[in-house]
Amino acid sequence: MSQKNLSSNSIQNHRVTWEGCSVLLDINDGDRLVFARLSPAAKLKIGNKNCSLQPLIGCPFGSLFQVENGPEGPYLSRFIPSAEGNKIEEKTDSETKVESRDNRALIDNNRAQSLTGEDIEAMRSQGARGDEIIEALIANSTTFEKKTSFSQEKYRVRKQKKYAPKVLLRRPVARSICEAYFKKYPARIGFLRVDTLSLLLSMANVSANSDVLVVDMIGGLLTGSVAERLGGAGYVCNTYQGDAPYSMDIVRIFNFSNEICKRIVRSPTSDLLSQKESSEQILQNEISMEETSLPSENGESNLDLENTNTAERVCTSGKAGEKASQDTMDMFKANGFSSLIIAAPEIDTWTLVNDLLPLLSNSAPFAIYHQYLQPLATCMHNLQVGKMAIGLQISEPWLREYQVLPSRTHPCMQMSAFGGYILSGTKTCST
């Protein structure tokens, strides 16, 4: 199959990678997370080895690869775990009694391993696989058989990460992207945890055929997550204050199709507010005209009803993040936004809500994320005093990660206990 046909078939089937797509590479079970764009010339450095990413093109997401040594240097080879390695052997009572040994008698003096570095390099030059080197290290270790089964497994995993690292090909979706950024660069996404992100989308009632107004100052993660849930049915309007729009670099990692990209638009807040003011003036003029107009002889009104119908969904944008067209702005003006989501830790929350809440349709939900509690508490108080919303509540997400292993199931010792705060509510009619 040619590369062109393979690429076209992969685009139709988004479970398979294609040339030019973005992927998340999970190295050694979460030790290192790397975003990459697949191409024949792309390379990934694992340890001190540079491996080409070309073998990853045309493979299903979820595939596992292992670094191997070849005549032309290291390369990524498809790895299929054996079924025997996934089985957990049940121990009898006699085997459990034998397992009562511990590591107290072991002495760490660097003399337990008889295999030297020169021997390992010689094995590599002869084309030995990573698994073969690990088995040789185990066979030449004088203390391996004296260790407990847990210590033996830890020794095997440690050597596997060094001599036979594995790379998992993951699909970049909202969850995996949020987890990767939260682990590597949490400040870039405002310390937004994955459970907090899912709660934001749920509280804002983001679903198909929705028009969502978003203030995204966390790199585009929120905009991409909303567009992913809409699936091309509905609009995401990323608004910003001032002349310079906020960064949306993370949106490019999602591998959105052209139809979904067309539904991601941008508009400054000043333009949206001017559209709102003009629509209110038009509505007042129409009300005054309706009061002064008289019915015709056949009982019909003289008003032109076509101008008051709901605007059709017309989109002329070509890529994600383009300025909203006039037709799209007219649609927002006629219908109002169906929900509002704010993640702007660098701007005063109440100022944003006071400006953007009138742009929502009546009974529209909103959800606001902030790393700290006080800005949301101040905003909630002002909304209550102004009677601008109902059902106001501040939620604190809570998540605990567990390590699940045989005879070792317990909460992880190192995990984030803080997930920020979310202010949610429903807009009420101002009149």
Image (spheres, helix red, strand yellow):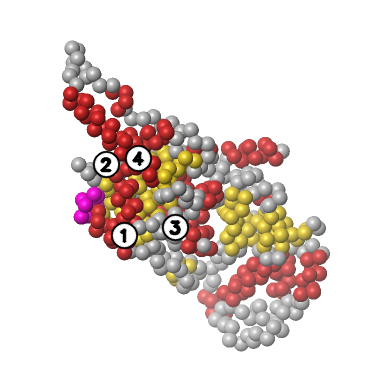
- Residue type at tag 4: Ser
Residue pictured at 82% horizontal, 64% vertical: 126
Residue pictured at 63% horizontal, 45% vertical: 20
Q: Are marks 2 and 3 in contact (CB under 8 Å)?
A: no
**How many marks do you count on the picture?**
4
Which is closer to the viewer, label 3 or label 1?
Answer: 1
Q: Are marks 4 and 3 in contact (CB under 8 Å)?
A: no
| Label 4 vs 3, first from the N-terminus | 3
> Residue 274 — which label?
4
Residue 207 makes an appearance in the image: no
| Label 2 vs 3, first from the N-terminus | 3
Up-down: is 24 above or below 151? Answer: above
Label 2: how many residues lie within 10 Å, few (<14), some (14-19) or many (20+)?
some
Is residue 357 rendered to the left or right of residue 223? Answer: left
Q: Nearer the viewer, residue 143 or 17?
A: 17
Asked whether residue 388 is drawn in magenta, I would say yes
In the picture of the structure, the residue carrying the numbered disc 3 is: 194
